[in-house]
Image (cartoon, rainbow, N blue to C red):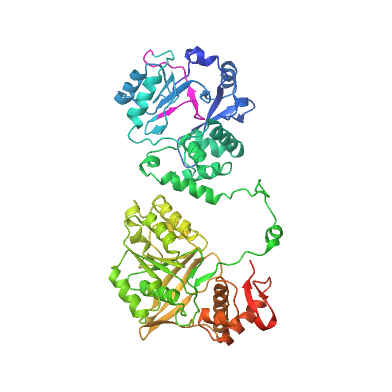
Amino acid sequence: MNAPTFDHIPAELQTLTRWIVWKLEPRANSDKPTKVPYTVGHRLASTTEPGDWMTFAAARTLAETNGYNGIGFVFTDTPYVGIDLDKVLTDDGVNPEAAAIVEQLDSYTEVSQSGTGLHVIAKGSLPPGRRRQGWLEMYDRSSPRYFALTGTVWNGHSTIQDRTAAVASVHRERFGNEAAPSPVVAPAQSSEVLTLMEQAAPKLYHRLVIAGETVPGKSESESDEALAILAARFTRDPTVIRAVLDASGLTRPKWTTHKSYLERTIAHALKVVPAPSAADPTRRARSVAEIIANGLPQPPAVVVPGLAWKGRITLVAATEGMGKSTLFAEAARAVTTGQPFLGKFPTVQGAVLWVVSEEAEDDVILRAVALDPRHSGLAHLYLQDHPVQPLDDLEAEIANRAPRLVIIDTVHSWAGTLIEQASQSDSWRPVIETIQRAARRGPLQPAILMSAEATKKTGDYKDSASIGHGVDVVFSMRQKKSDPISRQVERKKARWAVSDLWYQQKEGRLVQIPAPDASDKEREALTHAADDQALLGALDQGRAGVVMLAERLHWGKPRVEQAMARVLKRDPAEVRVVGPADRRQFEKVF
């Protein structure tokens, strides 16, 4: 560790009230301690709050008499640029590239507290773009950062010089091919947000913004997300959130080499953090009674009974040859024709977008024609064959076709070109977030039904857990050795009440069968529940009477009347009666 010689710190810095003290403290999941900034009273110091800054003399006295490890200079709103060259001094000498930068800048340079790095301070400002790459970091007045200064002058560079052109040249040489222009944001906007972030979560702020460290137990991408979410609590402007991210210590090449990465991260943060309403801009906590005063939340509308729901994502894991594509084809047939799913469960007609990524398009077509020999629903079945740009193409086709159901078979083959490491959550997160956004797109909000490769040992989906975390329902397809023609679609996860599906293939068609251990009463209850949900789904198309509902559902009138009688008894009411008694119609209560 390098012993400080504070007297050699440039006098022009000593005259400024921009000083704090710092202490080395252990951090979770790391052997390397972190420098935590403090002010008078052993309070955490803010790099955006002038009231926390001290004079040089006060900081020096506090550090030397109260057990702090050193003093730090805050760059916020100063004419200085700080260049941090980390781990460039070794027993063999100085890193040649670092030495060249020092000579190019030819301004005050000191050895860092660790004894293995160099700090250069010059007058000037940084161009737009990145601030960090490997062992090099560059910060200026717009950066909420501080340097732990030692005063140990290196190679005679003892005075601060105006090096605006040289600073720009170093930045261009080191970041020019990778840096993306920073968003045009008024400094006051991002500065104000940074201040609010620090006040709300000082320890998290210091870790992410100042120290540039990941959250303990979290990946780099998850830490980027945590910072964006913290910023989204105080601004809804994506350009301001981007400026906050750029000002942090988390910057890394992925932010520019993956051009849409930060855009997706910020969009996810704005989705996670709800916008304040005009009636309640503070987003205060509310009692459940207050929340449900205007009605209870409703479970998602059924699109494919027991398998897919409006605006939600279902994942079906299955091993090769289990028949997942055939099950999906049956779901597509039911929706495109409006005929019962598995020969029993009523289904409301609508368009289906099938993303073909594993098998040949011709195979999907032949299977669809076999299940729909009259071609009554083929005009509503759209195939997207092995898309070149999976994420963009998916969103575009959903906007064009407004499907009621989207099928992705399989998610592994569909997203294969986008995944760098299949087992890493960082690789899967943007893919799952795009699918989530697609499920909630527009007023129709399609159901997303996708398959995943499963392990032979457990039958669970392969690779990163973030796949399952990002979906609403997870099924695993199973087959009993004693019954090779029957399949169980077993629920592994669901955000609401969902039952297992049992079916088998008979005469070229898939048909529902009762669970082996189901009683007659349980089977009847399941049938009634399916009918009731289908009836509510039919009312999503608008107000209707019994005759029109029977046409929509392809039922007889008695079945509609029985289901309606059950639904009308629900409390709170989900359906109301409108019109005179002889021309009664029904509509959903929203």
**Whether residue 438 is situated above or below residue 178 in the rendered picture:** below
Q: Main secondary structure of the magenta part?
A: loop
Quadrant position of the C terminus in the picture: bottom right
Q: Which residue is at the front of the view, 88 or 301? A: 301
Residue at horizontal 45 percent and vertical 48 percent from the top? 264
Query: In front: 71, or 77?
Result: 77
Residue 376 location, quadrant: bottom left
Within the magenta stretch, is there residue 154?
yes
* Spot occupied by residue 270 in the image (x, y as percentages of width and height): 53, 48
Tell me where the magenta segment starts and ends, as one range: 137-156
Residue at figure coordinates x 35%, y 28% from the top left: 172
Please determine whether, in this image, residue 446 is positioned above or below residue 204: below
Q: Is residue 151 on the magenta stretch?
A: yes
Residue 63 x/y as whole percent: 56, 21
Q: Quadrant of the N terminus?
A: top left
The answer to whether residue 482 is visible is no
Residue 589 lies, in percent from the top left, at 64, 69
